[in-house]
């Protein structure tokens, strides 16, 4: 039965893509010969997002592809399935993380402030756009961290830390050392609809606690999408601020971590120790 359901979802996804994401739930359900209600529930349970979310995500992929090709932005908008400029521009920043013109030029004219420092987890790079903190990255090699940032914004103006930004990175490091309270800095969170749903669920995990990938999938209403949950955790660029280190395997073991399994273990040990100390104080 599961194989049959997966085939139905696969057919639905291909149908959405063939129509550039501009197709109604009723049409999709008719195409796969299922009732709209049953199809919608099955799709969300399997994919972790609704058919509409999938269609929007596919159009986002098309618009990004079209924007890097020659031609006007208007041409790119229509090629990617948006029937009106206004519909696209209303959500352009959410779709691209910046204006279409700036995205097309790789972030040209966008200022990204950054700094690299040391913390108990090794090197840390913190970057901030005009919207908020857009990257918190950990690693052993400072140059590799900077290269990763440059790949994300190849034509952006990367500006080294001034005195004001040093206060920001000091606040992030303080949060790294004791991430008990949410980071009180605005975050520039860019990701797909599904990724953002997962990341929001991670933000709800209490300090010192853990959840499994399956539990996160259940929480967001997509019990069959636990592998996609793991992929969303791996795509997180805001270490600790979005606590993907608090997600573990079903058997309690630690799984892969973007910043290294040792750092994941150390973060969890620090949180557990601080919880113990707080308990003794009470």
Image (cartoon, rainbow, N blue to C red):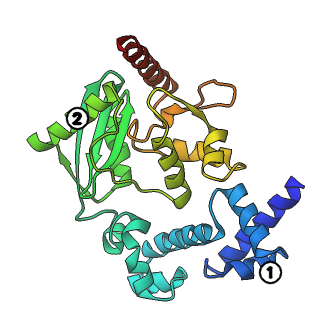
Name the residue at 31% across, 41% down. Answer: 146
Residue 129: image quadrant is bottom left
Please name whichever residue, 182 or 8, is drawn nearer the observer in this view of the structure. Answer: 182
Name the residue at 48% across, 42% down. Answer: 204
For the residue labelled by badge 1, is the local secondary structure a helix, a strand or a loop?
helix
Q: Residues within 10 Å of mark 2 (few under 14, many from 20)?
A: some
* Image coords of residue 258 (percent x, y): 49, 36
Left or right: where does residue 210 sit relative to residue 275? right
Q: CA distance from mark 1 to mark 2?
A: 54 Å
Left or right: where does residue 217 sit relative to residue 65? right
Asked if residue 226 is positioned above or below residue 28 in the image, the reply reads above
* Image coords of residue 89 (percent x, y): 38, 79
Mark found first going from the N terminus, 1 or 2: 1
Name the residue at 50% across, 86% down. Answer: 78
Identify residue for label 1: 30
* Image coords of residue 10 (percent x, y): 76, 64
Q: Which mark is residue 171?
A: 2
Q: Residues within 10 Å of mark 1 (few under 14, many from 20)?
A: some
The residue at the far left in this view is: 163
Name the residue at 37% across, 63% down. Answer: 97
For the residue labelled by badge 2, is the local secondary structure a helix, a strand or a loop?
helix
Asked if residue 146 is positioned above or below residue 256 in the image, the reply reads below
Residue 263: image quadrant is top left
* Image coords of residue 39 (percent x, y): 77, 68
């Amino acid at each position: 039965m599961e194989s049959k359901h997966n085939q139905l979802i696969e057919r639905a996804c291909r149908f959405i893509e063939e129509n550039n994401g501009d197709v109604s739930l009723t049409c999709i359900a008719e195409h796969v010969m299922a009732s709209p209600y049953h199809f919608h529930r099955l799709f969300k349970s399997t994919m972790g997002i609704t058919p509409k979310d999938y269609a929007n995500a596919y159009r986002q992929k098309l618009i990004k592809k079209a924007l890097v090709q020659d031609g006007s932005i208007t041409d790119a908008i229509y090629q990617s399935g948006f029937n009106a400029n206004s519909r696209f521009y209303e959500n352009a920043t959410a779709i691209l993380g910046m204006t279409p013109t700036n995205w097309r030029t790789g972030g040209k004219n966008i200022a990204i402030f950054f700094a690299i420092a040391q913390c108990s987890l090794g090197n840390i790079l913190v970057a901030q756009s005009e919207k908020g903190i857009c990257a918190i990255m950990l690693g052993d090699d400072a140059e590799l961290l900077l290269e990763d940032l440059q790949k994300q914004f190849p034509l952006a103006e990367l500006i080294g830390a001034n005195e004001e930004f040093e206060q920001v990175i000091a606040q992030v490091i303080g949060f790294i050392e004791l991430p008990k309270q949410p980071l009180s800095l605005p975050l520039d969170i860019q990701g797909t609809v599904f990724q953002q749903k997962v990341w929001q669920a991670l933000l709800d995990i209490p300090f010192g606690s853990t959840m499994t990938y399956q539990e996160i999938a259940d929480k967001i209403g997509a019990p069959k999408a636990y592998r996609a949950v793991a992929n969303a955790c791996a795509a997180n660029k805001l270490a600790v601020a979005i606590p993907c280190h608090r997600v573990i395997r079903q058997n309690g073991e630690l799984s892969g971590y973007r910043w290294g399994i040792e750092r994941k273990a150390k973060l969890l040990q620090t949180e557990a120790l601080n919880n113990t100390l707080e308990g003794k104080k009470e």
